[in-house]
Image (cartoon, rainbow, N blue to C red):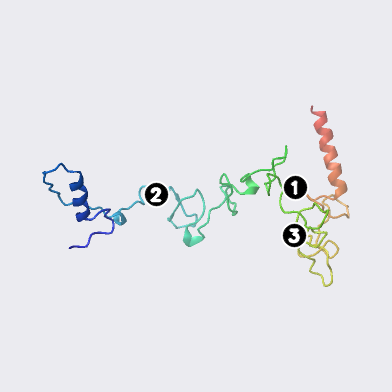
Amino acid sequence: MTNTPTTELFTVAEIHFICSAFAPSGSTLELEPAHVTDVAAIDLGSAFEPAFVCLVDGCATSIPWRRGHCKLHGGTKRCSHAGCPRGPQKGGFCIAHGGGRRCSMDGCTKAVQTLGLCKAHGGGIRCSVDGCDKSSQGGGHCRKHGGGKRCASPGCLKGVQRGQFCAKHGGFRHCLVAGCPRTDRGGGLCDTHRIQTKSSCHEMSVLHI
């Protein structure tokens, strides 16, 4: 008895038995050798050949996504925004370029953390200290209650602001307004000038209504 290829569904003996079970009584079956196709030998690559190639100069290796690298040169998907090295979220873009889910609060374009909300609107992990509803910065606690990185200055327990140091020990930037000694609290401005900027923008919007 010859060995049958591993891709056969039935042996010759099994085929004879099945056919004889359904054949009319008294009839004689003559089976021709079945042609067995070796599935492993079929080249499916051409049917699913991607249209994109690795971004590395001189590399012509095909990749299944729009932009990125082959396995030899990194092999991970990248945001579809030109020049962005981040990984993609839903829609092919990173969170910064509009990928992923957005916060469900009206007018908020920040990325969802949990429960359909961004961190500012209650999404994400909260501080584990009773009565504190601030977001966790690390270790289950907010910055006030010990979460997040500590200042690198010896003996300082304050949270890091910028460059491994707290604001007191140099981890800050000054407000961008000329002559202002206050620290940058976001967007390059101190709290005072941020409020003034928002007020000016509001006044301008009222004038254009």
Identify residue for label 2.
49
Determine the CA span between mark 1 and mark 2.
45 Å
Residue 34 visible in the snapshot: no
Compare residues 3 and 112 and report the one nearer the observer.
3
Residue 123 coordinates in the image, percent (x, y): 72, 48
Helix, strand or loop for disc 1: loop
Mark 1 vs mark 2: give the one in front. 1
Does 204 appear above or below 68? above
Q: What amino acid is found at the position of numbered circle 3 in the picture?
A: Gly
Residue 68 coordinates in the image, percent (x, y): 52, 53
Of the numbered discs 3 and 1, the one sitting upstream in the chain is: 1
Residue 167 coordinates in the image, percent (x, y): 83, 61
Q: What amino acid is found at the position of numbered circle 1 in the picture?
A: Gly
Q: Quadrant of the C terminus?
A: top right
Does 37 appear above or below 105? below
Residue 140, numbered circle: 3
Does 160 appear above or below 155? above
Residue 122, numbered circle: 1
Instruction: Identify the residue at horizontal 82%, vertical 30% (top origin).
Output: 206
Query: What crowding class fits label 2: few (fewer than 14 Cα within 10 Å), some (14-19), or many (20 or more)?
Result: few
Determine the CA span between mark 3 and mark 1.
15 Å
> Does the CB distance between marks 2 and 3 fall below 8 Å?
no
Helix, strand or loop for disc 2: loop
Which residue in the rendered view is the most extreme toward the front? Answer: 25
Determine the CA span between mark 2 and mark 3.
47 Å
Helix, strand or loop for disc 3: loop
138 displayed left or right of 3: right
